[in-house]
Amino acid sequence: MSVDDALLVGRIAFVVALYLFLILLALLLRRELLARAAQPGERAPGDLLVVDPFETGLEPGERIPLIALSSIGRSNENDIVLSDTFVSAEHAKLHWNGRGWVVEDLGSTNGTRVNGKPVRRAMPVKVGDTVEFGRVKARLVPL
Amino acid sequence: MELVLLLLAGVIVLSGFALLSAVRWRHVAPADLKYPAVYVASTFVLSLWNGRFAPRADQFILPVVAILTGVGILVVTRLDAGLGHKQVVWTLLGEAVAGVVMAAPRSVNTLRLYKYTWAFVGLLLIVLTILGGTDINGSGYRRWIGLHGVYFQPVELLKPMIAVFFAAYLDEKRELLAGAHLEVGRLRLPPFQYLAPLVAVWGLSLLLLIRQNDLGSALLFLGIFLAMIYVGTSRAVYPITGLTMFGLGTFVAFHIFPHVRERTEVWLDPFAHNATQGYQLVQGLIALAVGGIGGQGIGQGDPSRVPIVTTDFILSAIGEELGLAGIVVLLALLLFLIFRGLALAVEAQDGFQKLLAAGLIAILAIQTIVIVGGTTRLMPLTGVPLPFLSYGGSSALANFMIVGLLFKISTEAREVRL
């Protein structure tokens, strides 16, 4: 490769490198902004849409706003209180990790299910999935 | 993360210099990399320094500023190696200023206590320049102050000072300006008695325009003020009134002062004035056209035909050598910085800091619009530096002062939340 060829490649590579730098910045910024929402207590990008409320006093179709780390259960200490006899005092945790949702069962008596499948370990939940806490049924929806 | 980004920025800047050296000598001369290596090293020092004093400060501002400044030094060096070396020295001084601002133990809010001092010192500098300044480039206007052979432009330092003053003033009077009304018949007007500074600034900007023929700075100060008052009150009536007043002022100036008229005519038809006042603009446009989409390659164009190419017309040199592709990516990086700054304004917990961040960012944004618009003939040409890219010592100091203040604001915003 002659010097002139090398210069041509170098000059194109220089501008391309500037673009790559910009793209990298944008990707990192996006990651940081999403991760920022993962601090407990901050509003997370989703709601629970009530499907079957049973005794909770909620209405079907009602939206429950979610924070980045929402605790769910019958006791008043929880972020989301579901006062149904089939829901344990500390029933489950719903967590936004910056990219997606994760549900965790906290050893509840009647269990937590995602699309009918029981939650044993922490497992991911997608937008549109149905989540059941005991017999109370809700769907995860975007904001 | 900041260090990784800085490393990449450093590699890109250094390879740009290596390329420039290879174009000139047909091989890479290590001596050509000495100054840029010092500059790149200094960005790491600043980052480590910030990490020590404020580990939670924003991680994006410094890498963006570092790459913009680096490309700026590269282009200036290509145009005039001596100026490039001087720019490295100014940049190091600027980084030192940013480091000191960053490490200052007191809160940013300390600045607001001295708001009238800043306004007074800033205006005093301008008056001193008009009375006792030097006209170093034969423009016919005294815009520099010289000390032992080193010249600086006080108007650059006035920019951040005025932003501090406006932020402090507006934060105090915000309720009054946003809420109260002056009833005149059926019209509900804003309380103009609290707007004495608006009128003062409007007057000052026109004074700068007429006395110093510095339309760029005039537009800039008015723009900062209107942007900040709008951010502070969310009332559109202020920017609309301000711009109308400025429009009226320039209309009158157009009819009274020949140099304002001349400038407008050059803008409308530069090619008709190619032999005289339009020469610079025409050469700048030709440089952009020669560059095309991909550019001629760094060191391979001939941008030194454009007068004042290292400062006001740096965009033409970038366009000729890096092409439209290069201009777009550098403007996108500036836009990234501006968005980041606005996000900081939203994040800040304190009214004064919010307004200050918005004002400081407005300084960078308006300068970019004014000079990019001017060199591409979107609006009449007025000389202001392109932030971080143009050659200019005072401008580099002022810009790094702005960067330091933004760092400080971001640190405080995050400390409060945690």
Image: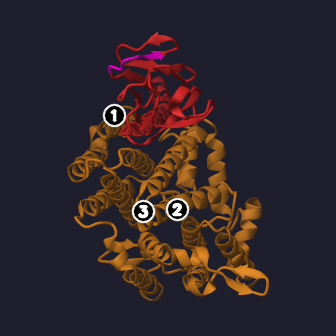
Chain colours: A red, B orange
Mark number displayed over residue B28: 1
Q: Callout 3, which amino acid?
A: Gly
Q: Position of residue A34 (x, y in %)?
A: 45, 36
- Of labels 3 and 2, earlier in sequence is 2
Q: Which residue is under mark 3? A: B392
User: Rounded to the nearest whole Å, what is the CA distance between mark 3 and mark 2?
Assistant: 19 Å
| Both marks 3 and 2 on one chain | yes
Mark 2: few, some, or many residues within 10 Å (few <14, many ≥20)? many
Picture quadrant of residue B180:
bottom right
Asked if residue A47 is positioned above or below residue B180 in the image, the reply reads: above
Q: Position of residue A9 (x, y in %)?
A: 48, 26
Q: Does the residue at mark 3 contact the one at mark 2 (Cβ under 8 Å)?
A: no
| Both marks 3 and 1 on one chain | yes
Nearer mark to the viewer, of 3 and 2: 2
Mark number displayed over residue B362: 2
Give the chain of mark 3.
Answer: B
Outermost top residue: A117
- Of labels 3 and 1, earlier in sequence is 1
Q: Does the residue at mark 2 contact the one at mark 1 (Cβ under 8 Å)?
A: no
Chain part drawn in magenta: A107-113
Residue depicted at x 78% and y 87%: B185
Q: Name the secondary structure under disc 2.
A: helix
Nearer mark to the viewer, of 3 and 1: 3
Residue depicted at x 58% and y 77%: B177
Provide the major secondary structure of the magenta segment: loop
Q: Where is residue A51 in the image (x, y as percent from the top left)?
A: 59, 25
Residue depicted at x 76% and y 63%: B268
User: Rounded to the nearest whole Å, what is the CA distance between mark 3 and mark 1?
Assistant: 27 Å
Q: Callout 2, which amino acid?
A: Ala
Residue depicted at x 54% and y 49%: B317
User: Rounded to the nearest whole Å, what is the CA distance between mark 2 and mark 1?
Assistant: 40 Å
